[in-house]
Image (spheres, rainbow, N blue to C red):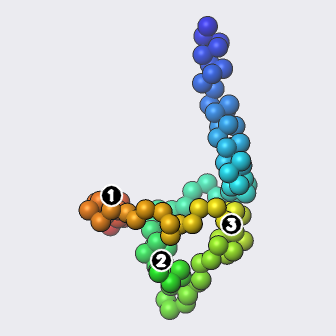
Amino acid sequence: MFTRFITIYNPWVEQKKQKECVRSMGFGSLLKMKIIDIQLKLGFYILQKFDSERMVIDVEGKKLKVTAESVHDMLGIPTGGTILTELDQWPKDDTSYDEWKQEFK
């Protein structure tokens, strides 16, 4: 019985299933990335510099246009699928974003 329990909850098996799921959604190229983590401050800095209306990252006056193609070229993320502008808007009274931002101050 104990052996069966270990087989069912084997982390390697779960990780393999997760990777298969990621591949099936078209994000397999992300699994090939050698980056282990991104510093939180760097990620937050990029988010601060991102203008979602113009779809650009503005760093010291230099603008990097963010397109489906540029994201696909850099990360291998598939193009097409869900149209982000058709998703529900974040509720204005939700404080989660503000609480998250406080972690970086």
Vertically, is 18 above or below 7? Answer: below
Residue occupied by mark 3: 79
Give the quadrant of the N terminus: top right
**Residue 43 placement, left or right of 30:** left
Q: Which residue is mark 2?
A: 52
Q: CA distance from mark 2 to mark 1?
A: 19 Å
Q: Which of the numbered marks, if any, corresponds to residue 104?
A: none
Label 1 neighbour load within 10 Å: few <14, some 14-19, many 20+: few
Looking at the picture, tell me which residue is in the foreground, 5 or 94.
94
Q: Residue furthest bottom?
A: 61
First reached walking from the N terminus: tag 2 or tag 1: 2
Expressed as whole percent of the image width and height from the top left, the position of residue 86 reads 50, 66
Seen at 55% across and 61% down, the residue is 38
Query: Mark 1–mark 3 contact, CB under 8 Å?
Result: no
Outermost residue, top side: 1
Counting from the top left corner in percent of width and height, residue 60 is at 49, 89
The residue tagged 1 is 96
Quadrant in the picture for residue 70 = bottom right
**Amino acid type at image mark 1:** Ser
Kind of residue at badge 2: Ser
Mark 2–mark 3 distance (CA, rounded to whole Å) = 18 Å
Q: Amino acid at mark 3?
A: Thr
